[in-house]
Image (tube, coloured by chain):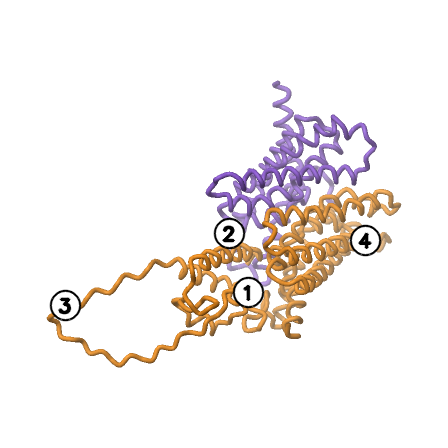
Amino acid sequence: MEPSTQKKRWLAGAIWENPLLVQALGLTAVIVGAVNLRAALWLSLLLSVHLMICEALAAAAKRVVPEWLRIALYFLVGLALVCPAAFLFERSPVTSEAALRLFLPLAALSGFAPARCERFAVRHSVAEALQDAVANALGFSVVAVLTGALRELLGSGMIWGSAVTNVYTRGLLMPFGGFLILGTLAAGLKVLLRTLGVRQGGQAEEPMGLAPEDRMERLEKVRLLMEAPEPEPEPEPEPDAEPEFEPEPEEFVPPKPIPVEQILSGAAGFDDLDGLDDFESLGETGQALTPVEKARLLEELESLLDDFAGPLE
Amino acid sequence: MKDVIMVIITAAIYAVFLHNLVFSGGLGASEVLRAAQRNSEPLMTSVMVSLFTTALAVICRLLESAWLQNTKLAYAWRAAVYGGVLLALYIVVCVVIASLPLRIKRLLLKRIGMSALNSVVMAVPLLIFRAGENLSWAIGMGLGAGVAFFLVTLLINSGLHILQQNKAIPPVFSGVPAALIYTGLLALAFTGFTAEALF
């Protein structure tokens, strides 16, 4: 993998496509659990480990295991991680950790790890999946810790259990406070990205792939063309009519065949896709797509379009 | 029989309004936002949430009566048992759906993960255990959880449409920030039902 692609993947996971503020994943854990700094740190640690294990498993199992069974495995890993932690917190003398143990078993059902695994890990190698997991875990942890700190300060006037101020609003410790703080942080992230001149979700011309909204548009065009009906045959000319002037035909240059995987991964750029209106040379062998390839392509497209319903733009 | 029905209705109203699991509890937030984005599926997702929640609440309540209440199992391990029951229930339902000749089999299998394995479903039996409630309350809470999920999804879905059409919203607040703040304000309104002090 090129160093520039690796760097962009780090930035995408941690900032451009931040799991909390852009993809809206793992909201429950932060809204319910991250009510103070200490709890936010513990939650971030547990969910980060959960994500890394699940993405590694998903990348290793890939499409061998059916999707519904993969989701059950993610949940099983989550239970195996958080229930022992909740048991340890139950005996902890620290009040904030004791309060966390009530919510922790529910953190096993966080949609954070399953969503990242199904959107990314199952289509990439184990190394790339682990890199994505670390980047997303970092992005999640920064936001969760910041939210926990803000809620503890504004909701109880304390930081790390030590009183800082007498002015606070208890309501911010409730779920609506979590929603409001996360919404404000999401707006703040947009301001930061606009100031840096970065389009949220990545830049289209970069080798990592198309921006999500551009990819949606291209995938829709592919799907419509795949499902287009056969063109009607041209009518035969009348036998007594004078022959029409026919210019010399231009030399036909077939478009360069592009592997299906390259299009699905978004690595094919605009220039590569623009000329392929008939897709006759789309197959890996340069021949027209077989019915099996078409069915597989349609299935992949449906799955990708479904996955790209994530960001609320 | 009349008392049982009244308990079920009361528990359902409690789960929908007095302690809405999404707005007042903050549970299932990501799943609700994703379901709200899909215009055509809030009802299907909510029905599946309701079915799984009710089934899990009933099974766990029966398990408590028959076995767990006689053990001194810690809360964390009890939650692990409930999670195991949910996992088994989910796998059985998926296997049954996969074996049936249904046209919407693929769609059901794609959506069932989000509906079954989310925090709203598992929260109900844990809440019932902590409150020491009976089987009728478990059924009512399970049904109410599905209604609550549907109500919240509809509210957020209609709100997202209005937010997308409103050009007066500053660009930095459009999309996810507006959706989260809008959901937070709805949650604030429902928090009023709980009579908890905000200050």
Query: Mark 4 or mark 3, which is nearer to you?
Result: 3
Of marks 3 and 1, which one's residue comes earlier in the chain?
A: 3
Q: Nearer the viewer, residue A134 or B3?
A: A134
User: Which residue is farthest right?
Assistant: A93
Mark 3 residue element: loop
Q: Which residue is mark 4?
A: A38
Mark 4 residue element: helix
Q: Amino acid at mark 4?
A: Arg
| Residue that appears at 41% across and 72% down | A275
Q: Which mark is residue A265?
A: 1
Which chain is disc 1 placed on?
A
| Residue that appears at 61% across and 56% down | A62
Query: What is the CA distance from the residue labelled 4 to the residue labelled 3?
Result: 85 Å
Query: Mark 2 or mark 3, which is nearer to you?
Result: 3
Counting other residues with Cα less than 10 Å from the Cα at mark 4, is it few (<14), some (14-19), or many (20 or more)?
many
Query: What is the CA distance from the residue labelled 1 to the residue labelled 2?
Result: 30 Å
Q: Amino acid at mark 2?
A: His
Q: Does residue A217 appear left or right of residue B68 in this picture?
A: left
Q: Quadrant of the N terminus of chain A?
A: bottom right
Q: Position of residue A182 (x, y in %)?
A: 67, 55
Query: What is the CA distance from the residue labelled 2 to the residue labelled 3?
Result: 56 Å
Q: Which residue is mark 3?
A: A238
Letter of the chain shown orange in the rendering: A
Q: Which mark is residue B161?
A: 2
Mark 1 residue element: loop
Q: Are marks 4 and 3 on the same chain?
A: yes
Is residue A245 at all visible to an observer of this figure?
yes
Q: Amino acid at mark 1?
A: Ser
Which quadrant of the view contains residue A267? bottom right
User: Which residue is farthest left?
Assistant: A240
